[in-house]
Image: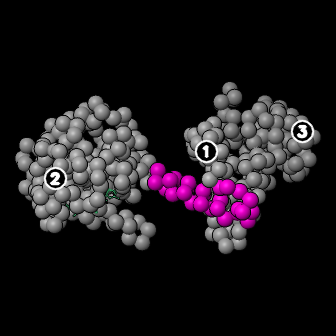
């Protein structure tokens, strides 16, 4: 298979050498004369020992200075040009220029965009232009790390492809021979890419903030984090990473606030640790707004415990949420705690029902985290879907 790679920075050079290594004939397109001359003389334009070594040994590569020179028998073009950060969003002007150039001169191309992108609406607009010129646009984001490009190319964290009918392309069928491919839409591909890096940044900042604990002199933070990371059940796992309700229960809020209060004053106000609970409370406010704006006037809540089977409503965010809702008649039933206990925690303005049937009977809608338990025609709204 023959492909072209446009833009030979870290991503383009790695793609060029990587796909050549996998047996493809690859043509590199680089508009910068100095870089192009370097390639022609056998030198990649940046320091990377593995890539330089691979380049010195490769023989199925060719180089061009512009998109217009790409051979007419090539059907797949990987675009790896820069998308610099301007203020806090990405500048797509170089990507657009490269795509327009392809679309003005070619038809029947599969364009694989490897550059990092942020706004799916912009990509949808670009896709219309690409389709109108009888070409196809796919996203193929890159997850490699500088200085680890070669290893990450051969063994990527994941391989994501986005775009209609991607599985009917030859390039897709080549890729699945080597990599485990996830298919998704443009917006999902963009989200996985930029949220992965944001998550890495969050981990770095979280760990670094722990160096500013007031009692830091009493701990070996590297030892602490080594123990912390040995928990692959909760700490280093997919646990807690699927969006749903705000956190609740007796421990997460308490310990998060306790930890942030132990940070030195130099960093506490700007810290992520302090922001965690502020963000969680904001999410509760947003759920309240959605409930207040719903069309229903008589609403029910089933199940207030913070976790199914715990029977524990201490610090359940639902208690705070219910107390803060305005303009609705609220009915409640919870079979895991006594009505006496519920009345103690809630005030008399709420209707505490004797049974689930009464709750169903007396309300227009029921908000619950346990929607699978219900066998009713009543409208149910899962709290983790709000
Ligand atoms: N650097 C990384 O490790 C990394 C990792 C993952 C994703 N990314 C993303 O990949 C993209 C590329 O990153 P990079 O670091 O390789 O960029 P880079 O700036 O090092 O390289 C881009 C190259 O494209 C060339 N170029 C631009 N327009 C061209 C055109 N029309 N024709 C031919 N050549 C053209 C430029 O001259 C430049 O050499 C960015 O969106 C970046 O955010 C980078």
Is residue 243 rendered to the left or right of residue 71?
right
Q: Nearer the viewer, mark 3 or mark 2?
A: 2
Q: CA distance from mark 1 to mark 3?
A: 42 Å
Q: Secondary structure at mark 3?
A: helix
Q: Is residue 167 above or below residue 76?
A: above
Disc 1 to disc 2, C-alpha distance: 42 Å
Q: Between disc 1 and disc 2, whose residue precedes?
A: 2
Q: Nearer the viewer, residue 361 or 353?
A: 353
Local packing at callout 2 (Cα closer than 10 Å; few below 14, some 14-19, many 20+) is: many
Left/right placement of residue 335 relative to residue 374 reads right
Residue 239 x/y as whole percent: 61, 40
Image depth: mark 1 or mark 2 in front: 1
| Labelled disc at residue 229 | 1
Q: Nearer the viewer, residue 24 or 101?
A: 24
Report the image quarter containing ligand 1.
bottom left
**Looking at the figure, which quarter contains the N terminus?**
top left
The earlier-in-sequence mark between 1 and 3 is 1
Q: Is residue 229 above or below residue 41?
A: above
Residue interval drawn in magenta: 196-221
Looking at the picture, the colour scheme in use is one colour
């Amino acid at each position: 298979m023959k492909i072209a790679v446009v833009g030979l920075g870290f991503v383009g050079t790695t793609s060029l050498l990587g796909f050549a290594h996998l047996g493809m004939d690859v043509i590199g397109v680089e508009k910068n004369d100095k870089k192009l001359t370097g390639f022609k003389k056998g030198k990649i334009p940046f320091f990377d020992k593995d890539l330089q070594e691979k380049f010195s040994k490769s023989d199925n590569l060719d180089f061009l200075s512009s998109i217009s020179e790409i051979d007419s028998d090539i059907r797949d073009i990987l675009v790896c040009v820069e998308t610099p950060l301007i203020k806090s969003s990405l500048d797509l002007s170089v990507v657009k220029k490269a795509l327009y150039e392809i679309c003005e001169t070619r038809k029947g191309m599969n364009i694989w965009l490897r550059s990092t992108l942020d706004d799916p609406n912009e990509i949808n607009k670009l896709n219309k232009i690409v389709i109108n010129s009888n070409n196809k646009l796919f996203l193929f984001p890159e997850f490699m790390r500088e200085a680890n490009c070669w290893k990450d190319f051969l063994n990527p964290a994941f391989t994501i492809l986005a775009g209609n009918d991607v599985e009917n392309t030859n390039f897709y069928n080549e890729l699945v021979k080597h990599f485990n491919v996830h298919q998704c839409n443009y917006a999902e591909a963009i989200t996985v890419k930029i949220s992965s890096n944001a998550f890495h940044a969050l981990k770095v900042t979280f760990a670094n903030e722990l160096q500013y604990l007031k009692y830091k002199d009493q701990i070996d933070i590297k030892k602490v984090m080594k123990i912390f990371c040995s928990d692959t059940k909760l700490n280093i796992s997919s646990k807690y990473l699927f969006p749903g309700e705000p956190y609740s229960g007796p421990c997460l809020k308490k310990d998060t606030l306790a930890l942030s209060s132990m940070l030195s004053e130099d960093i506490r106000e700007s810290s992520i640790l302090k922001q965690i609970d502020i963000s969680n409370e904001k999410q509760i406010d947003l759920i309240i707004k959605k409930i207040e704006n719903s069309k229903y006037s008589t609403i029910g809540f089933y199940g207030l415990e913070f976790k199914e089977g715990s029977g524990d409503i201490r610090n359940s965010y639902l208690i705070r949420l219910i107390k803060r809702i305005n303009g609705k008649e609220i009915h409640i039933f919870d079979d895991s705690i006594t009505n006496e206990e519920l009345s103690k925690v809630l005030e008399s303005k709420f209707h505490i029902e004797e049974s689930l049937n009464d709750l169903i009977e007396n309300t227009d809608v029921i908000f619950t985290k346990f929607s699978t338990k219900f066998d009713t025609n009543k409208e149910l709204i899962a709290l983790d879907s709000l």
